[in-house]
Amino acid sequence: MAYTVSGRLLDKDRQPIEFGIVYTSDSSGKPIAGSRNYTADDKGRWVLNGVKDSDYITGTMVGYNKKTIPAKSIMNIPNVITGIPQRIINITLLDGEKST
């Protein structure tokens, strides 16, 4: 059964990463056929619809190391207002290697 996952893309200082990409992938971070993707907004917010437990979610941005998380590890959290469970996660990207 497919579900929606939402969250924020953040840097190591917990600041939003504007316009980074979040997409469904395999365990190595390679986009899968029919991959869903979303460009984070200016607050680092993103939403992916149609995510399955077999998918992984990868966050990436130029200048940062990409991070891949198994979708099935994202727990349902009840919304305090509606009571409807939601899958929400923050993805923190670390600075990429600097070349000299």
Image (cartoon, helix red, strand yellow):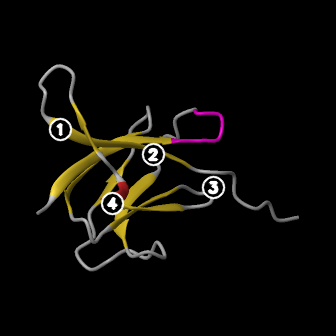
Q: Report if residue 50 lies within the magenta region.
A: no
The boundaries of the magenta stretch are 10-14
Circle 3 is placed at which residue position?
64
Sequence-earlier tag: 2 or 1 = 2
Q: Distance between the residues labelled 3 and 4?
A: 21 Å
* Residue beneath disc 4: 71
Residue at 44% of width from left, 38% of height from top? Answer: 44
Counting the numbered discs, the total is: 4
The secondary element bearing badge 3 is classed as loop
Q: Is mark 1 on a helix, strand or loop?
A: strand
For marks 4 and 2, give the CA distance: 21 Å
Q: Residue furthest bottom?
A: 33
**Residue 53 locus on image (x, y percent):** 25, 65
Work out whether 14 lies above or below 60.
Answer: above
Q: Is residue 25 above or below residue 61?
A: below
Query: Can residue 26 be seen in the rendering of this structure?
Result: yes
Dots 4 and 1: beta carbons under 8 Å?
Answer: no
Q: Residue, x 59% and y 57% (percent of image)? A: 62
Amino acid at circle 1: Pro
Label located before the other in sequence (3 or 4)? 3
Viewer-nearest of discs 3 and 4: 4
Q: Name the residue under label 1.
A: 85
**Label 2 belongs to which residue?**
19
